Amino acid sequence: MTGQTLKVAIVTGASGGIGAAVAERLGKDGFAVVVNYAGNAASAEAVIARIESEGVHIDPSQDGAEVVNTVADRMRREIYRNIGLADLLSPQAAG
């Protein structure tokens, strides 16, 4: 994608704690946010709803805490296809 103007942030561990706060702040700052979480789908959906209430694009992504090369590569391809290039990575996943 050339000429991309949308800022994209990937936040791992975004279903709670610091990760959720980072994801919500980036959404308020105008980033399209990829909310990545390991297993707490209900909490991730609540974070997504709060960010979307600000009119921000959200792309949920569920993975285990062990983000290995194959998972990272899949995420990179999905994000590029759905949103564009990522501008920021905020790794908050606990493991």
Image (cartoon, helix red, strand yellow):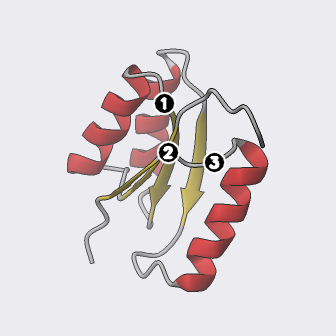
According to the picture, the residue beneath numbered tag 3 turns out to be 85
Q: Which residue is drawn at 72% across and 31% down?
A: 3
* Percent position of residue 49, x then y: 49, 29
> Which quadrant of the view contains residue 66?
bottom left
Quadrant containing the C terminus is bottom left
Q: Disc 2 residue type?
A: Asp
**Proximity of marks 2 and 3: CB atoms separated by less than 8 Å:** yes
Residue 88 picture location, percent across and down:
43, 48
Quarter assignment of residue 51: top left
User: What is the CA distance from the residue labelled 1 to the residue labelled 3?
Assistant: 12 Å
Residue depicted at 43% across the width and 36% down the height: 46
Q: Is residue 79 left or right of 56 when viewed as pictured?
A: right
| Residue type at the position of mark 3 | Leu
Name the residue furthest top: 54
Residue located beneath label 2 in the image: 87
* Residue located beneath label 1 in the image: 31
Percent position of residue 55, x then y: 55, 15
